[in-house]
Image: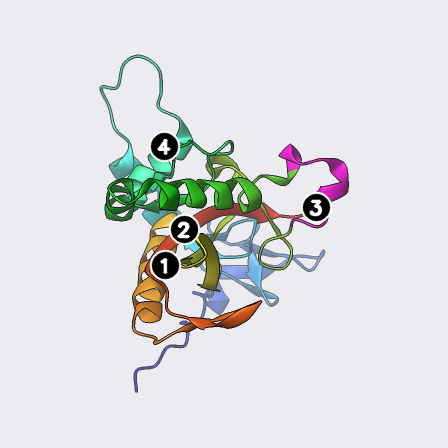
Amino acid sequence: MADTRKPPPPFAPAGAVRRMASGRWAYKSTGRIAPTVNGRPLAEGWRKDKRGRVYNVARRREVAIKNFRTGITGKKPAQSRNLGARAGLVLWKGPPAPRWPTAYMAIDERDRLTDSMAWKRSALTAWCDNHAVPATKRPKGERAQHLMMNHWRVTVARHAQAWATVTLAWIESRGIWVVAGSTPISDEPAEARSMGLESRDSYATRAALPMPDGPPQKPADLVSLSIPIRRAR
């Protein structure tokens, strides 16, 4: 079995740092304060982001330069659109179009649903309008009740701190979409897309899904939705 444990953070050699009177560590070569993990200083060139994840500064800069596109004129595209395009996701826009554009899906999924029956598309839009609405767009009395994935709330892509992915099942006899399951929270939209499609394919092999108010039923269709979320304050 493959070892799935994360490698340890790259800690600084003992001779490369010195302990200051304040208890903090500093690099001997530059005098800069060294970020720490569990009290141990990281190697020079490594830092932590706001969520405590360790990253290599040079590598992140290299990726940023590589992804930077030059020669773009006119109005800058919306960040949410870029996030989806890079991850192979697109917004679900109906018909009719959802009031809150926060539900994303794989491009081929959108194209397939666009060609399906009208009431199935309208029911999916209705589900998005009821469940994929940013908390700030709801009346104050409803905001505390509309949490997704424990302490996370729905937001727009440009404010996303993570992505939640749910698999919806189309129940033909009732004309509704119901939640069949969900995947772990993802840091990136591309990861959310990949896990969502795997979840959809997994549920497609099952004989029937349990219903909250009736006997189990075999879904006539399945779709994976990825929804941007952020921590509830």
| Three-letter amino acid code at the position of disc 3 | Arg
| Three-letter amino acid code at the position of disc 1 | Gly
State the separation of the CA atoms marked 3 and 4.
26 Å
Residue drawn at point x = 38 percent, y = 34 percent: 93
| Three-letter amino acid code at the position of disc 4 | Arg
> Quick one: label 1, few (<14), some, or many (20+) residues within 10 Å?
many
- As helix, strand or loop, the secondary structure at mark 1 comes to helix
State the separation of the CA atoms marked 1 and 2.
7 Å
User: Is residue 148 in view?
Assistant: yes
On whether residue 202 falls in the magenta region, the answer is: no
Of the residues under marks 1 and 3, which one precedes in the sequence?
Answer: 1
Percent position (x, y) of residue 154? 56, 44
- Answer whether labels 1 and 2 touch (C-beta < 8 Å): yes
- As helix, strand or loop, the secondary structure at mark 4 comes to helix
Of the residues under marks 1 and 2, which one precedes in the sequence?
Answer: 1
Q: Which residue is mark 2?
A: 225
Q: Which residue is mark 3?
A: 233
Marks 1 and 4: which is nearer the front? 1
Quadrant (top left/top right/bottom left/bottom right) for the N terminus: bottom left
Marks 1 and 3: which is nearer the front? 1
- As helix, strand or loop, the secondary structure at mark 3 comes to loop
> Quick one: label 3, few (<14), some, or many (20+) residues within 10 Å?
few
Where is residue 213, by image quadrant? bottom right
Percent position (x, y) of residue 117? 30, 44
Percent position (x, y) of residue 149? 58, 58
State the separation of the CA atoms marked 1 and 4.
19 Å
Residue drawn at point x = 34 percent, y = 81 percent: 3
State the separation of the CA atoms marked 2 and 3.
24 Å
Q: Which residue is mark 1?
A: 196
Q: Which residue is mark 4?
A: 81
State the separation of the CA atoms marked 2 and 4.
16 Å
In this view, the residue farthest toward the right is: 141
